[in-house]
Amino acid sequence: EVQLVESGGGLVQPGGSLRLSCAASGFRFSSFWMSWVRQAPGKGLEWVANIKHDGSEKYYVDSVKGRFTISRDNAKNSVDLQMNSLRGEDTAVYYCARGEDGYYYYMDVWGKGTAVIVSS
Amino acid sequence: AIQMTQSPSSLSASVGDRVTITCRASQGIRNELGWYQQNPGKAPKLLIYAASILHSGVPSRFSGSGSGTDFTLTISSLQPEDFATYYCLHDHTYPLTFGEGTKVEIK
């Protein structure tokens, strides 16, 4: 079964750090781009970051550039999101998603999400 | 960044109704657009990519159309499981951006 499972969420103070992980199974992980998408409470979806199959390309939404880092370990079938200098507006459920990148980029497999709360 | 504007933000409809949701891009994005469905408390699901290609396993009552700046998602005959929030997402350039969402509620 194709599956993504996020972990690492929790409560963190403003200015703090958190590392999210996403474990993939059931497919050839090293062949796919991976994404992080977040959803603040009661709000819509926001794309956060993408990483290419081999980690050679990474892209971020402007609001997290310089604070968040996406990385992957193809040997462990996992993708991480290191989040530093966290702010209240980073409070959200964070979803990991598999990306198909032929000519079009779309996210066809999603995890259930992990909640991040930034609060003092 | 390209802005995606969805309308309406919400709608009420009955089972069996035909429903149309629109998404407008702030600049031309060819057909580089997908549609996602999200039920409350659940992860999003891919419905359509490349503006009109139905993802595997998605019922044929869903269809998408459009190119350039204007796109539509149509549900030909609304089913009980279709009451959810729908988002468009462009993949034309980075940053990728979602529309604000359209909540489809039961009338």
Image: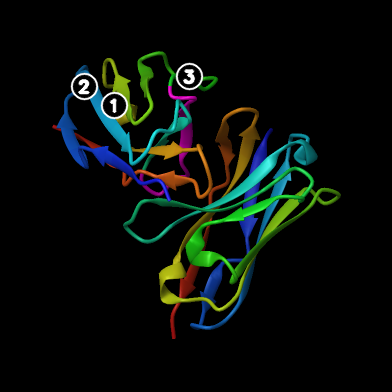
Instruction: Kindly indicate whether the residue at mark 3 contacts the one at mark 1 (C-beta within 8 angstroms).
Output: no
Image position, residue A103 (x, y; %): 61, 27
The segment highlighted magenta reads B40-51
Instruction: Decide which of B82, A104 is in the foreground and name it.
Output: A104
Based on the picture, tell me whether residue B42 belongs to the magenta stretch. Answer: yes
Q: In this view, does A74 lie above or below B14?
A: below
Q: Mark 1 lies on which chain?
A: B
How many residues crowd mark 3 within 10 Å: few (<14), some (14–19), many (20+)?
some
Instruction: Decide which of A39, B81 is in the foreground and name it.
Output: A39
Name the disc covering residue B80, or none: 1
Which mark sits nearer the N-terminus, 2 or 1? 2
Q: In this view, does A76 lie above or below B4?
A: below
Which mark sits nearer the N-terminus, 3 or 2? 2
Name the disc covering residue B15, or none: 2
Q: In 3D space, how far apart are the residues under numbered discs 2 and 1 (Cα atoms)?
A: 6 Å
**Residue beneath the point at 62% across and 38% down:** A99
In this rendering, the label closer to the viewer, 1 or 3? 3
Q: In this view, does A28 lie above or below A74?
A: above
Task: Give the residue at mark 3.
Answer: B54
